[in-house]
Amino acid sequence: LKPFWLKQRLNTRLDIEADRPHKQHRAMSMSLPPHPVGVKFWTSLWRENKDLPYSQIHTKFQNWYGHAFHRNFGRYFYAHRAGPLGITAPLVVFAVGFKVATMYYGTLRDLGAATESAQAYGTGGY
């Protein structure tokens, strides 16, 4: 048995063509698809920011990111008129809902346990 990293070499189309002396070898030609963002984007970023101090670069990025974030995800946030609770409203609603669900589960669990223990002691489940 050979180790798994020593696999037998499979004959590929290029190997078969290399064995044929009458075939003329052509150079491989392949074209890559264009980069999804593009090289011009990255080079323009570098050109615009290479001579600036870090504080200005950071401020520019924070402004761009904040605007882009709120343009894309702003509809999921509460408006400023959300009241005194404001942004904590979703947290409070989740906490109250979680508390109610937990209490409901505990009540059902305790009722089931009480019924089973009553049946075990022969009181007919009451």
Image (cartoon, grey):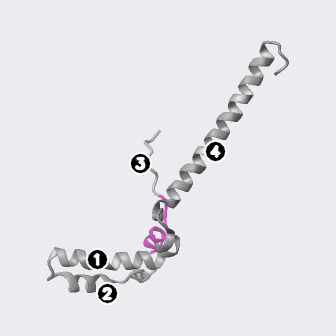
Around disc 2, counting alpha carbons within 10 Å, would you say few (fewer than 14), some (14 to 19), or many (20 or more)? Answer: few
Q: What's the distance in space between the residues labelled 1 and 2, CA to CA?
A: 18 Å
| Rendered image: mark on residue 61 | 1
Residue that carries the numbered disc 4 in the rendered image: 101
Q: Are marks 2 and 3 in contact (CB under 8 Å)?
A: no
Is 101 displayed left or right of 72 in the figure? right
Magenta span of residues: 10-20
Residue that carries the numbered disc 2 in the rendered image: 40
Around disc 3, counting alpha carbons within 10 Å, would you say few (fewer than 14), some (14 to 19), or many (20 or more)? Answer: few
User: Could you tell me if residue 78 is visible in this image?
Assistant: no
Q: What's the distance in space between the residues labelled 1 and 3, CA to CA?
A: 50 Å
Instruction: Tell me the SS state at disc 2.
Output: helix
Q: What's the distance in space between the residues labelled 2 and 4, CA to CA?
A: 54 Å
Q: Position of residue 40 (x, y in %)?
A: 31, 87
Around disc 4, counting alpha carbons within 10 Å, would you say few (fewer than 14), some (14 to 19), or many (20 or more)? Answer: few
- Mark 3: which amino acid? Leu
Instruction: Tell me the SS state at disc 3.
Output: loop
- Give whichever of discs 3 and 4 has the lower sequence position: 3
Q: What's the distance in space between the residues labelled 3 and 4, CA to CA?
A: 58 Å
Assess whether residue 81 is covered by the magenta stretch.
no
Q: Are marks 1 and 2 in contact (CB under 8 Å)?
A: no
Instruction: Tell me the SS state at disc 1.
Output: helix
Spot the residue most to the right: 124
Residue that carries the numbered disc 3 in the rendered image: 6
Q: Are marks 3 and 4 in contact (CB under 8 Å)?
A: no
Around disc 1, counting alpha carbons within 10 Å, would you say few (fewer than 14), some (14 to 19), or many (20 or more)? Answer: few
Q: Which residue is rendered at x = 39% and y = 81% of the image?
A: 37
Closest to the camera, between mark 1 and mark 3, is: 1
Closest to the camera, between mark 3 and mark 4, is: 4
Q: Which residue is rendered at x = 49% and y = 63% of the image?
A: 11
Query: Residue 57 falls in which quadrant of the image?
Result: bottom left
